[in-house]
Image (cartoon, rainbow, N blue to C red):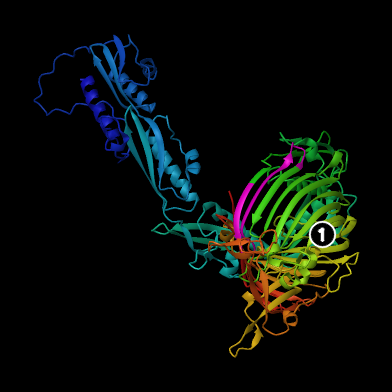
Amino acid sequence: MAQGAKAGGFRQLGMALLGGSILAGMPNGADAAITRKPLAEAKPPVAAAKPAPEAAKPVAPVAAPVAAAPAQPIVTLSVEGAQRLEPDTVLSYVQLRAGQPYTETAADQALKDLYATELFTDVQVRNDNGRVVITVKENPVINRIVLEGNKHLKEDKINPEIKLAPRQIFTRSKVRADVARIIELYKRQGRFAATVEPKMVRLDQNRVDIVFEINEGPKSKVRQINVIGADHFSMKEIQAAMMTKTARPLHIFRGNTSYDPDKLAFDQQKLRQFYLTQGYADFRVVSAVAELTPNKRDFIITYVVEEGQRYKFGDVKVESQLRDFDGKILANQLPMKKGQWYNAKQVEDTIDKMNETVGVFGYAFADTRPDYIRDTKNLSMGVTFNLQEAPRVYVERIDVNGNTLTQDKVVRREFRLAEGDAFNSVQVKRSTNRIKSLGYFQEKFEVKQVNGSARDRIVLEANVEEKPTGELQLSAGYSSLESFIFQASVRQNNFRGRGQSIGVSGSVSRYSKSVMLSFTEPYVFDKNVSLGVDLYRRDTNNYNYYSTNSSSLYKNSTTGFQVRVGVPVTEYVSVVGRYTLNLDKVALSKSQFYTQDSTGAYTCNPLLAGRYLCDAEGKRISSIIGGSIIYDNLDNRMRPTRGQSASAGVDFAGLGGDVRYARLRLNASKFYDLGKGFIVSLKGEGGAIKALSSRNIAGVDDVYLTDRFYLGEPQIRGFDIRGVGPRVVRKPYTTDSTGNYVLTTDKNSWTQDAVGGKYYYMFRAELAIPLGSGAKEMGIRPSLFLDAGAVWGITKPTLQDSTQICGSVGCSIFVPTRDANGNKLYYQTNADGSYTTTTSATNTSTGAANTALGSNISAFKEFYHGDTPRPRISIGVGFNWNSPFGPFRIDVAKNLLHEDGDDTKTFQFNVGTQF
């Protein structure tokens, strides 16, 4: 009876475990014809079924008891149905053995043991006269795990957290555990409405695909925050001190509006900190409860608090056990005074400051402990800072660990302390910042302080974690200044692990092309001297930027190199010397600006190009020697928030070459952190250049056109490129409605040429405005700015009025058409009646004169504007966004002050990307 009942009972168990969840595959095993079914809830193992009780019968006379038959021994023990597992492996999980007596209790235990392995979906034990057969049906093998519907939590975040994986044995308990784990991951992201439905797809060879169908749902926002018991502060003041914010429809850039249990605990600490800074020393949070709304979309958070009494500072003292510090003198320098409201954060900051000050004098293990004297009657809190006795400490050893590529000396030379020096906490902090500034290691790096071999010895450990220092960058973008821009660069910032930098870069835009090869050795021969070399070629087309005519005015190409040497003077001051050799070539379009004189020579025609352009044409060699002194203590050179920098540089051209001048440049910047993400930056810049030799040409300045200063976009927002400063404007004549000749007012027909200046200054003030952590994570940074500047001081160029040459207003000037070599082009009629273009003035067939090709330009008059030091001022709004397709910048500016001839511009933008 046992074997039949057990067979039927466990067959029902297998059907229950598989019920509705596994669909049989198609005969050919094709996955495309397989559908999914939800996984059924697992049921507990079913023991052997017992016979139903029989109906009551008349009681017969009781006979004498008969002795129970002895249990039948197991003659043979075999396994059926195993596919992946060996029969001996299956038998090793049970306690049944041949020769042992077979009992129902032993069979039940064998079933429990086999189900406990989670390797089988169905197990039966059958006894046929001592021949015991264990029939098993193995759990399927997982072929793959499929996640569907997970848009906000990608596979690389979910897969490491779940237990199921391909080639593992499928079990329902693991499925349930993984469902709970995925839901927990979504709760951590604030998505409490997320649901996960597991489904299984049956494949051939006893394989299955597990599909987790995920409905992420919306983020559960914090709808409301209640603080019960807060009587002395408004909810606005209290919520400003907390990390979690309430969600509002119009606050699209506000962050931390999603519910997070960790933030709930953190906000309790923030509440306590807020009240402790306001004098409420007895404040405590009684309870914090987060209630989820029925639709699982919002949370309502309620805090119950007890504010307690408000305290003021009592007597504030310092008791020092260190011989180098007088407690009374230190007490007079403390920021808190008796009678002020008690502020726990001020006490903590004072402790840190005192420990840092003590550390400067070599006490690495100094410990400042505050003693509080609470007077509940007078509501005062006295504080006594105790400077504990500690020995002076010396640096026993400096260890550098974790560097596999970077040489030890590259890290060691950034330490401001040497082995044997007295410990100095400020120098340790400075060493940490210098090593971080290398950019070779992880961002969260700190110099670790470890006890040395004696009490007065300390070991400094630099446990670095290297990161890739090679850069391959390809970028493309569009700006209102240069239209499409393409750039490429390859750079290695830690070449051969020596801290050397080597790179090559190039760029192409509408107006310019450039290529540069650079190399920098920061420590020449292991001395604190830097050496850098740059080789470059730059080609610039200077267009008439302000009209629809995009023909080139002149082309400037510079080929050269620069060698620079830098030496630090102090920790924040350095001196840089440099030598530059440039070959400059300024060329005008021969077909546009040249004419042929009576001798047949081609010369620049001032009527076409302007005298100032004709005077700039030619090749020149510039041999320049210069130097700069630099001060820099910014906290971050890429995106500073505090500190200042300043530099003064002087260059002299004339150590050989064709150009002689002296140039001075000054610039300075200051950054203020106003707190809460508000950063104010002030920047100033100025320069002057003076020629050291005279060109002795009337109406031509001694400083060449290409060596002068220019201002405009992007230096001063609100003005176009080179839109500020001296310029020559050529205005053509036209006829008005009455037929009289007048100067045209159409700017598109003007030719405006910025001619630069010998002096300039520029000032910029900007306020960075935070929008909340949500906008910060998106890389959105708006700002308000004010820009001011001017450029001036050249010799007024000789201006032209073609009406004086023509003799009457409205005359025209014939401009011949030329080929690329400057030859005039003619229109020739051939003997066969065809027409051709030729450079010959005489018809080769008939000997007749050919017709010159060309056009007539209207008479014009030149004006000179903008040569004044009066400031140009603009204000506006800037908008930075680290968008998914690259950095994006928009500036909208309004001019407050400008001069005649200045070209203003309200809107400018720049966008690019890297790939």
Q: Quadrant of residue 88?
A: top left
Q: Position of residue 796 (x, y in %)?
A: 81, 75
Along the viewing direction, whichever of 471 and 784 lies nearer the viewer: 471
Up/down of 22 relative to 537, above or below: above
Residue 711 is situated, as x and y percent measured from the top left of the image, at 74, 68
- Residue 904 in picture, x, y percent from top left: 66, 74
Q: Is residue 624 above or below residue 413?
A: below
Q: Is residue 139 left or right of residue 595?
A: left
Instruction: Please give the residue where the numbered disc 1 appears in the rendered image.
Output: 317
Relative to residue 59, is residue 382 drawn left or right?
Answer: right
Q: In screen coordinates, is 406 left or right of 28?
A: right
Identify the residue at horizontal 85%, vertical 41% (top origin).
524
Q: Residues within 10 Å of mark 1 (few under 14, many from 20)?
A: many
Asked whether 424 falls inside the magenta stretch, the response is no
Residue 233 visible at all:
yes
Report the front residue among 420 and 237.
Answer: 420
Please state which amino acid type lies under the numbered disc 1.
Lys
**Location of the N terminus (image quadrant):** top left
Query: For the residue labelled by badge 1, is the local secondary structure a helix, a strand or a loop?
Result: strand
Estimate the x, y position of residue 80 in percent, counting from the top left.
Answer: 29, 18
Residue 480 on the magenta segment: yes
Tell me which segment is drawn in magenta: 473-500
Q: Nearer the viewer, residue 435 or 562?
A: 562
Quarter of image, res 617:
bottom right
Closest to the observer, 222 or 252: 252
Q: Is residue 46 above or below residue 380?
A: above
Using the rendered image of the protein, determine whether residue 780 is visible from the camera's viewpoint.
no
Give the residue at x 41% y 59%.
293
